[in-house]
Amino acid sequence: MVKIPLGLSAGGEPPIRVLIDNGEYWLNNKGDLALLDVTVRRIRARWPDARIGVLTYAPGLLRAFEPAAEPVGYRRGAHWSRLGRSSQLPARLGPAVVGRVSEVWWSLTNPPRRQLRKLPDSVRHPLTRMKEWRSHDRDRNTVNRGARIPEAAKTASLIVAMGGGYLADVDTYQATRTLDLLEYACEKGIPTAALGQGIGPIDDPVLFARAAKVLPRVDVIALREDVCGPDLLARMGVPDERIYITGDDAVELGYDAGRPEMGSDLGVCLRIADYSPVGAQARTSVRRSVQEFALGVGATLVPLIVSECESEDRRSTLPLLEGYPSVAAPLDRYARARDLAAAVGRCRVLVTGAYHVAVFALSQGIPVVGLSSSKYYDGKLGGLRAMFGGGLELIHLDAHDLDDRLSKSIRELWDAAPQLRPVLRERARAQVAASREAYERMFGLVERTSGASAQSMLDRQSSV
């Protein structure tokens, strides 16, 4: 038996270490989970011995959802995880068990943390461990986070900003945090990639200036749409040769979930959030339109819950289905992204204000009525429609004739579904191929430099 020194691969060189940033550290959003699944799976397939670190606030849940990845905290001093038998337990228990245990833990520990945050910094400072649990809202007020770059970044072979819509005004906190990490990597000569990105809108001059300083230095930037992102990056000075138009990385997961037969149900999801406000009158119109149409064609209504952040999609979607005679049971809050994609597959048409179920639907050849109430969602859904060449009717929820528009769009897409299916599936295949091409570019960056930097990487790993 050949014994391999700790930290080395079977070939004797330091293992590749990939550090992944993402838009949802609590793992509450199945769209982000789909992106994570595809990203980790592709990296693992290319580099079976790689260590894949994911920035997260939910380490146990990450191990349950993605056993091939390891949690890394976004805080000063956060190292790569220790590997051992205990780290494998969440994967054996599964997300449902781990998630509910985590809920109990947070219900017990969150009140003391809230009290701790009320103390002056001079009192809290010695309690360094507790300071690491600062809330998202408190961190939002922090502008310079350079000192919080995880220690794990120092020994990374590659730093990836995973797909999402967080490089935008709606999430300046996460956008700045990601830009900080990418800038650190660029300064240290670590290869960087931003994959499956929905960039913008960015009208905030401070955020625009920050992005314009960092993004032109990123090695690979893959965009999920070609309507707004390319122009925005051009204004930031990003070289054309670094930009790829790929579609959303989650298209692959949605496509793989496709059924051989066309569905017969009507899927529904309504997103209500600060970045997607929906008034009572619009909610009533959506409820009336989907129920009347479904009743007329004898369809079951399928609630499709994407975001479990404060149960926002459940609280806004389930009331729309109340009183209807045939409603499918919603998925468990800790269901996997592929389970949601499978639930989408039973539908003939979707009515949704959430982006990623629209991705899952179009990828399977299922047309979508997209609901928007903001510039942010106009961009998300409009860009998605452009990537698929149609199959998505965008409805603004402030339209004065909302009931008529909804009913007409649902009916037209329902009738056109058989003809749209093969066209949408073909567009999905093209996006998967483009996305994989961008990953190949990223993989090549690391592999071309790995040999020359192996000793340097080993020196860095041994010094921390």
Image (cartoon, rainbow, N blue to C red):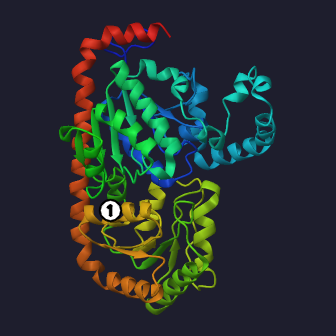
Residue at (46, 7) in percent of width and height: 462
Q: Decide if residue 218 is in sight here.
A: yes
Extreme-left residue of the structure? 241
Does residue 412 lie above or below 373 as drawn? below
Label 1 amino acid? Leu
Q: Give the side of residue 364 with respect to residue 83, left or right.
A: left
Q: Residue furthest front?
A: 205
Q: Going by the image, does 203 lie left or right of 390?
A: right
Q: At 48% from the left edge and 58% from the top edge, which residue is drawn? A: 339
Residue at figure coordinates x 63%, y 85% from the top left:
323
| Helix, strand or loop for disc 1 | helix
| Rendered view: 96 above or below 286 | above
Front residue (pair 48, 92)? 48
- Left or right: where 359 falls relative to 86: left
Q: Which quadrant of the view contains residue 18?
A: top left
Of residues 196 and 15, the one nearer the viewer is 196
Q: Quadrant of the N terminus?
A: top left
Q: How many marks?
A: 1
Label 1 Cα neighbours within 10 Å, binned few <14 / some 14-19 / many ≥20: many
For residue 305, what is the image quadrant? Answer: bottom right
- Say which residue label 1 marks: 384
- Is residue 298 in sight in this rendering? no
Is 354 positioned to the left or the right of 124 in the image?
Answer: left
Tell me residue 138's x, y (percent).
66, 40
Q: Decide: is 375 above or below 135.
A: below
Q: Position of residue 246 (x, y in %)?
A: 26, 50
Spot occupied by residue 193 in the image (x, y as percentages of width and height) = 32, 35
Instruction: From the top left corner, tell me how far across and down residue 438 is, in percent.
Output: 24, 41
Please tell me in which quadrant of the rendered image residue 233 appears. top left
